[in-house]
Amino acid sequence: MNPQAGLAFEQAPPFALPLRFFLTAPLFLLAAGMLVAFAPDALASRWTPQALALTHALTLGFLAMTMMGALMQMLPVVAGSTLPTPRFVAWFSHVPITLGSLALITGFLMSTPLAFKMGVILLGIGFTVFLAATAISLARAAAGITVTGIRFAMACLAITVMLGLALALVQVRPDGWTSATVKAIIAAHAAFGLLGWVGLLVISVAYQVVPMFQITPPYPPPLSRWLAGVMFALLLLHAASPWLIPVAGPLVDAGLASGILLFALTTLRLQSRRRRKLPDVTLDYWRLGMTSLMSCMPVWLVAQLSPAWAGSDAYPLLLGVLFIGGFAVSVVCGMLYKIVPFLAWFHLQAQLQARAGSIPTMKNMVAERWMRMQFRLHLAACILLIASVWWSPLAAAAGSVLALSAGLLWINLLSAVRRFSAYGGRFF
């Protein structure tokens, strides 16, 4: 099977549209690192203002920003369906979400109601524009496993945004909300945002990019055909579990954990069978991501067996570090190192009709040694963050290394952009 079969590269949007998302995202990762370094309470409890600011810097500023840029590129190419008015969508999703994320983070850190409200409004505008545009694009897209998975992921994003707005309403008007209802909304917001939006989108994109860029066999058809839909159904049951029979919650959670574990093991198995055995830093990022994802399972399992561990501050923090930092950030970094150089090379080739050897190859867009250095910094940051959950004095070092890693990621991506520009590439 040719992983590039059916790809409509001629429908790719101008380089500048996804690029603005890709170049903004590392700056939020840099801010997250500085927050950990200078505000150790970010790793003291999941409920501290610093921890909430850190979580949203990573999930909104880095992960969502990157994944939205990737969707702007992938929907026209993979689904064969361009977004309506893509330049409008790029401007009126990127700018409000960037400013809204900054305002929300400021609102958490400074306990400023005005900043918090402005953040919610701007994020609501940005995500509404993006969700509406992608819904139109997906409605007319050609059917396929990646498109189906993206549809489920976008549904999870829409639910996450609506639940986030409900939580914002709780902050503004706390009267009339029971603690049980608020707790259920928070749990559903986290589940749909992390397992649904982030997890299902990574899974769906993996069906295309892992065989294409890592030269592996395709994912098994039963897995790629059913996993996203089953996971989405389980997430709906997870949200409803507080109102179901007591045994339903643990069974649904076990199903979600099994689906995640199956995806991680399958991905590692496919990567072990890749046809090109050359060293590849992006492959290292994926392996780190899959290992971290699998490591979430024993952490979760111990919580099911030990109420003391489940009720501790360390449990959700460790799970968050492994899932967000170890899995999601790692995989997204690996994808950025493939997507941005590929787009730079592709647009140069298309614009200049260049002969082989007259423009840099995709591999030469970013120096391998600097990508390798950044991966080592990221790996060190992940290890230090895990250790910081138990020994808080390491938080400053963990945040500093994470900030250095993010800064180098940004510089590396800029190097591909500079090469693109130096050879006469046009961004629009």
Image (cartoon, rainbow, N blue to C red):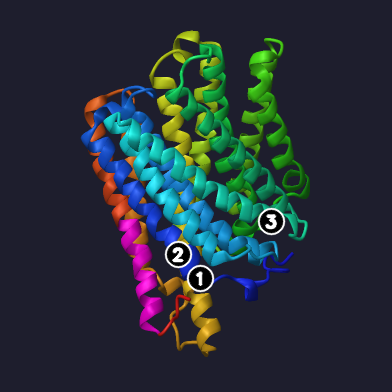
Q: Quadrant of residue 385?
A: top left
Q: Could you tell whether 222 is left or right of 295 in the image?
A: right
Q: Secondary structure at mark 2?
A: helix
Upstream in the sequence, badge 1 or badge 3?
A: 3
- Badge 3: how crowded within 10 Å, few (<14), some, or many (20+)? some
Q: Which mark is residue 343?
A: 1
Viewer-side residue, 365 vs 163: 163
> How far, Cα to Cα, is label 1 from label 2?
9 Å
- Separation (CA) of disc 1 from disc 3: 24 Å
Residue 48, image x, y percentages: 33, 24
Tell me if label 2 and label 3 are in contact, CB under 8 Å: no
* Sequence-first disc among 1 and 2: 2
Tell me if mark 2 has few (under 14), some (14-19) or many (20+) residues whose alpha carbon lies within 10 angstroms of its own: many
The residue positioned 60% from the left and 59% from the top of the image is 209
Of tags 1 and 2, the one toward the viewer is 2
Residue at numbered disc 3: 136
Task: Name the residue type under label 3.
Answer: Ile
Query: Which segment is the magenta one?
Result: 408-423
Name the spot of residue 407 as percent of width and height, x first. 29, 54
Helix, strand or loop at mark 1: helix
Q: Kindly identify the residue that appears in the image at 50 percent across and 61 percent down.
A: 90
Q: CA distance from mark 2 to mark 3?
A: 22 Å
Which residue was labeled with disc 2? 19
Q: Residue at x 50, y 9 (%)?
A: 307
C-beta proximity under 8 Å, tags 1 and 2: yes
